[in-house]
Image (tube, rainbow, N blue to C red):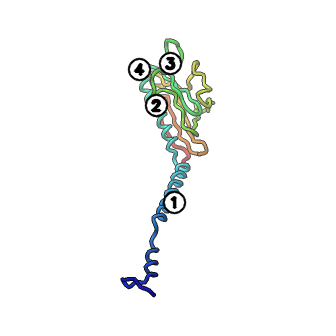
Amino acid sequence: MPTSGTGNSRRRAARVASAGFTLLELLIVVAIIGLLAQAVALSWRALGNDREVEQETGRLSSMIDLLREEALMQTRDYGIMFTETGYRFYVFDYQQLEWALPQGDRLLEAHALPRLLSMTLMLDGREVPLDPDFESQDVENAEPQVMLLSSGEVTPFTIEMTRAGIAGRFELTAELDGKVTVLQKEYD
């Protein structure tokens, strides 16, 4: 059996060299772990609290609080027209005696929900049928379902915001005095 200059056999040196992992093997393991982590994160999002629904509900809640304060400070009446997939704001024009779209205010532009999110509107404990989107609404003769009056009063309503295929939902409730609450329902 031949030996090297150090006295070790070549066979033993070959066994020692093959005992570690190659860089390619390590990269494959890291890629597999990354894919598994991504799958877990996606399934967690599908099964757990849906951040996008929560953010959209929070956005609507903030807009209602802001408009209620604006209505009080500017003695203007605001309205909200809901569809299944978004909402649009209106201002009451006392000269024309009709609801009009706010001009030049980017904050009050129509807001479409992200894909697969939808809303249900409840007034007086009854579900209100909503148009599927903005295109099916009559912008000229608008009659908002919810009003934010200059007296500080708000049409009492509940909006349920959901994602298609997921049982959980966020529920936004506004009371007559303008108090807005957001509740998370049926998420595990």
Question: Marks 3/4: CA distance?
Answer: 12 Å
Q: Amino acid at mark 2?
A: Met
- As drawn, the residue found furthest toward the top would be 95
Determine which of the numbered discs, if any, sits on residue 74 in the image. 4
Which residue bears the numbered disc 1? 32
* Residue at 46% from the left image edge and 74% from the top image edge: 18
6 or 142: nearer the eye? 6
Question: Marks 1/4: CA distance?
Answer: 59 Å
Question: Marks 2/4: CA distance?
Answer: 16 Å
* Residue at 42% from the left image edge and 26% from the top image edge: 69
Give yes or no for contact between labels 1 and 3 (Cβ–Cβ under 8 Å). no
Q: Amino acid at mark 3?
A: Phe
7 or 157: nearer the eye? 7
Q: Amino acid at mark 1?
A: Ile
Circle 1: is it few (<14), some (14-19), or many (20+) Cα within 10 Å? few
Examine the rendered structure and indicate whether residue 66 appears above or below residue 188: above
Determine which of the numbered discs, if any, sits on residue 92 in the image. 3
Q: Secondary structure at mark 2?
A: helix
Question: Marks 2/3: CA distance?
Answer: 17 Å
Q: Secondary structure at mark 1?
A: helix
Circle 3: is it few (<14), some (14-19), or many (20+) Cα within 10 Å? some
Q: Amino acid at mark 4?
A: Gln
In the rendered image, residue 126, in percent from the top left (x then y), is placed at 61, 32
Q: Secondary structure at mark 4?
A: helix
Mark closer to the chain start, 2 or 3: 2
- As drawn, the residue found furthest toward the bottom would be 1
In the rendered image, residue 134, in percent from the top left (x then y), is placed at 58, 28
Determine which of the numbered discs, if any, sits on residue 63 in the image. 2
Examine the rendered structure and indicate whether residue 132 appears above or below residue 12: above
Dividing the picture into quadrants, the one containing residue 20 is bottom left
